[in-house]
Amino acid sequence: MQNELTTHDIWSWLSEVSDPEIPVLNVVELGIVRDVSISNDIVHVVITPTYSGCPAMRTIEEDIVEVLEEFGVKNHEVTTVLFPAWTTDWMTDEAREKLRMEGIAPPQKGSADKGLLMGRLRDVKCPRCGSTQTSMISQFGSTACKALYRCADCLEPFDYFKCI
Ligand SMILES: [Zn+2]
């Protein structure tokens, strides 16, 4: 006989789904999973992509389904919701710290992508030395979700997570 499934279980399983772009982060701490509910024995998961064009989103959806099935959930429904749009504020402070440890500059709270599109972004901090004397070398870093920056102080290039 199976124990009663709770949303708490689902949340903890989903925190095992890592982000394909940044494997050290999971989709819960990134704020991608918006809602989990169970009704009529169907598990509903609502996700919002970090940005609508993110090529990783399909993978995330597939990974979520895979984890649910691994834990024996047969009836599931993953819904992608684009509005309200994901903001960096949904990302936990722990997730930001993990990014920094990986040498990736975390997105700034409340920042918008507009500055980046115009080729500039204020105060992107170097994840290694903390300097704000940084400049963008390329709009695209190691993946489409990252931009390549260089620090003028320690001269190290680094990725800035720009999916905002
Ligand atoms: Zn630096």
Image (tube, grey):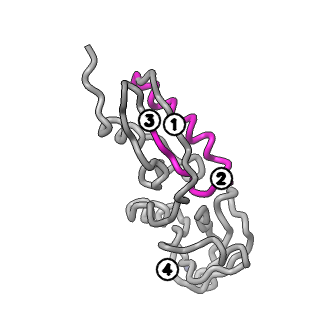
User: What residue sits right under mark 2 in the picture?
Assistant: 54
Where is residue 134 drawn, in percent x and y? 62, 82
Taking the spot 45% from the left edge, 39% from the top edge, the residue there is 45
Q: CA distance from mark 4 to mark 2?
A: 28 Å
Q: Nearer the viewer, mark 2 or mark 3?
A: 3
The first of marks 3 and 1 along the sequence is 3
Label 1: which residue? Answer: 78
Q: Disc 4 on helix, strand or loop?
A: loop
Classify 80 as above or below 44: below
In this image, 107 relative to 157: left or right? left
Magenta-highlighted residues? 45-72
Q: Nearer the viewer, residue 154 or 74?
A: 74
Q: Which mark is residue 92?
A: none
Looking at the picture, tell me which residue is in the foreground, 75 or 122. 75
Looking at the image, is mark 4 or mark 1 earlier in the sequence? 1
- Give x and y (percent) for residue 118: 73, 78
In the picture, the quarter occupied by the N terminus is: top left
